Amino acid sequence: MRTLPSRTIASASEPNDATPFLPDRRSLSALRESVQDCRGCHLWRGATQAVFGEGLKRARVMLIGEQPGDKEDLAGKPFVGPAGRELDRGLEAAGIERKQAYVTNVVKHFKFEERGRRRIHQTPKRFEIEACKPWLDEELETVKPEAVVLLGATAAKALLGSSFRVTQHRGELLDSELAPILSATIHPSAILRAPDEAARAAEREAFADDLRVVAQALSR
Ligand code: SF4
């Protein structure tokens, strides 16, 4: 599929709501199938495919990131690239099995701009997040996790409001109707952006500490 820079394909006349594309039957498998036909916003045009959440229907923990990256867009699975490996490390350090968790994103299609042959991540805008939210709402409603972990500012602001600051509240247990246990931390890609190995190691440890708070709350 030929990919186009996403900044050239947005249009004021595009739809801005995924709701009409939700299936009648709201199982995870039906949702996963239907999301491929979603035209709720313009982001489907440049992406290879939609990337729906992955994990057990009865997962106790749901981890919610921003959007699929380059590797995820190609694989059709969430958190399989370098950031996914950081997520796996953090979960393992915290004693949470990834295969016991459900991992997903607030936006299901990869937003990027092309620079030469590279596809560079672009942060989704508010209207794109709003358009895509019905898919995440259905995942939350279907899985009903005991714990939700918001990974990064985009996911945290999407679900907790634009004034929420991950840097101020990371690793805290928050009150919300989203789930009995709710917490926010950095997106694991932030570890990869640390300037050197020492900084990466410190970020990794802080990320694992945030996830340990959730693991401890689940064990009570
Ligand atoms: S990003 Fe979300 S709302 Fe937009 S087309 Fe993809 S699945 Fe639909």
Image: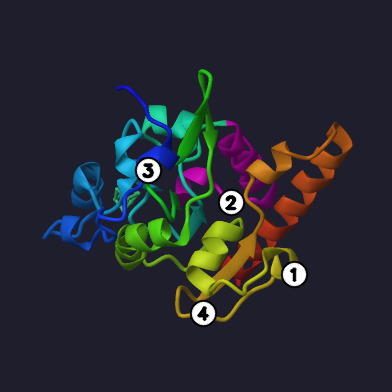
Mark closer to the chain start, 3 or 2: 2
Per the image, label 2 sits on a secondary structure element best described as: loop
- Magenta stretch encompasses residue 77: no
The three-letter code of the residue at mark 1 reads Gln
Range drawn in magenta: 82-102
Q: Residues within 10 Å of mark 2 (few under 14, many from 20)?
A: many
Residue at x 42%, y 59% (from the top left corner):
129
- Numbered label attached to residue 152: none
Residue 100 point in image, percent of width and height: 46, 49
Q: Label 4 neighbourhood size at 10 Å, few (<14), some (14-19), many (20+)? A: few
How far separated are the C-alphas under marks 1 and 3?
29 Å
Secondary element type, mark 4: loop
How would you classify the magenta stretch by its main secondary structure? helix
Residue under the image location 45 percent in, 34 percent down: 72
Question: On the image, numbered disc 2 is attached to which residue?
Answer: 96
Which sits earlier in the primary sequence, circle 2 or circle 1?
2
- For this orientation, the residue located farthest to the top is 117
* Residue type of the residue flagged with mark 3: His
Tell me which label, 2 or 4, sits earlier in the chain. Answer: 2
